[in-house]
Image: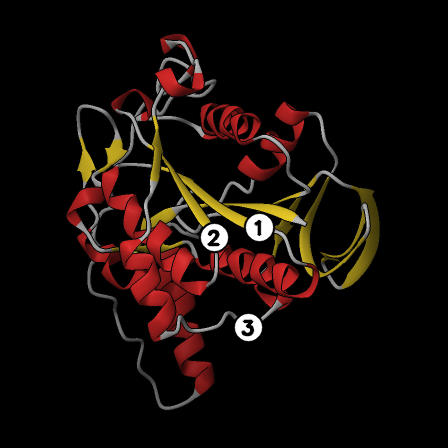
Amino acid sequence: MNTIVCIKQVPDTEHLQEVTINPETNTLEREKIPAVINPFDVNAIEEAVRIKEKQGGKVTVMTMGPPQAEEALRTALAMGADEAILLTDRAFAGSDTWATAKTLARAIKKIGAFDLILFGKQAIDGDTAQVGPEVAEALSIPQITYVSKLEVEDKKVKGRRTVEDAYEEVEANTPCVITVTKDINEPRFASIKGLLKAKKAEIIKWGKNDLALKDEEVGLNGSATQVIKIFSPPKRGKGEMITGDSADEKASKLVEKLKADKII
């Protein structure tokens, strides 16, 4: 069972207050803050490694990003992935979900034979949940999204798909795309042996020309959507404490305040 896991390096949520925006390109200046593997993608890596441990095969992990995204790939290798590919090229900068999916799909075709492509259900920076499904569409293969339990047997997969207060079970033939939730497993910690192996591992690097992509297919030029303006929300001022001897008195004062400010 050959599995490809597509991951993304995202800003560490503990440092979100340090995020800055490039006023000229309207993009996040990611290189200025610490980055981690998108949390949902860690579950995708774990699931791929578990499938390999049960059924054999190979796990290839891939990401598109700047050179520093190599760190995320080495973490995946330390968890048990066998091969890592970094799609990096200045031409890829500013890609929206569609341009990203097109680039990933081209790289997957270059890899060749595969049975599964795993993604986290969404990235915590963009929260679009679009790239996995768009890759499936670009490759013309089935997809099962928001999977919290996965069964793989022969050339078929069954995914328990979370939908609001219930779930549904969906079957598909391989090859197919699966996007997973955090409920699917508990990711392992990398072993010392895994960390040492990952540190020495070769990272395959492909750019625009390696994937036979044109300038108009990638980056801002290849994006179907454009960010016209992006800005940080204004800082909130200090609030006002409503006081009173009873809940009724506090409620009355609050209503009068809201009326005076013409909110109600």
First in sequence, mark 1 or 3: give its number.
1
Cα–Cα gap, marks 2 and 1:
6 Å
Q: Secondary structure at mark 2?
A: loop
- Viewer-proximal residue, 28 or 84? 84
Q: Secondary structure at mark 3?
A: loop
The location of residue 48, given as percent across then percent down, is 59, 56
Which amino acid type is shown beneath numbered disc 2? Answer: Asp
Which amino acid type is shown beneath numbered disc 3? Answer: Glu
Is 169 on the left-hand or right-hand side of 197? Answer: right
Snapshot quadrant of residue 152: bottom right
Q: Residue drawn at (57%, 26%), measured in percent from left and top? A: 109
First in sequence, mark 2 or 1: give its number.
1
The residue pinned by badge 1 equals 58
The residue pinned by badge 3 equals 186
First in sequence, mark 3 or 2: give its number.
2
Q: Nearer the viewer, mark 1 or mark 3?
A: 1
The residue pinned by badge 2 equals 82
The location of residue 112, given as percent across then percent down, is 59, 30
Residue neighbourhood size for the residue with mark 1, other residues' Cα within 10 Å, grouped as few (<14), some (14–19), many (≥20): many
Q: Residue drawn at (31%, 76%), measured in percent from left and top? A: 242
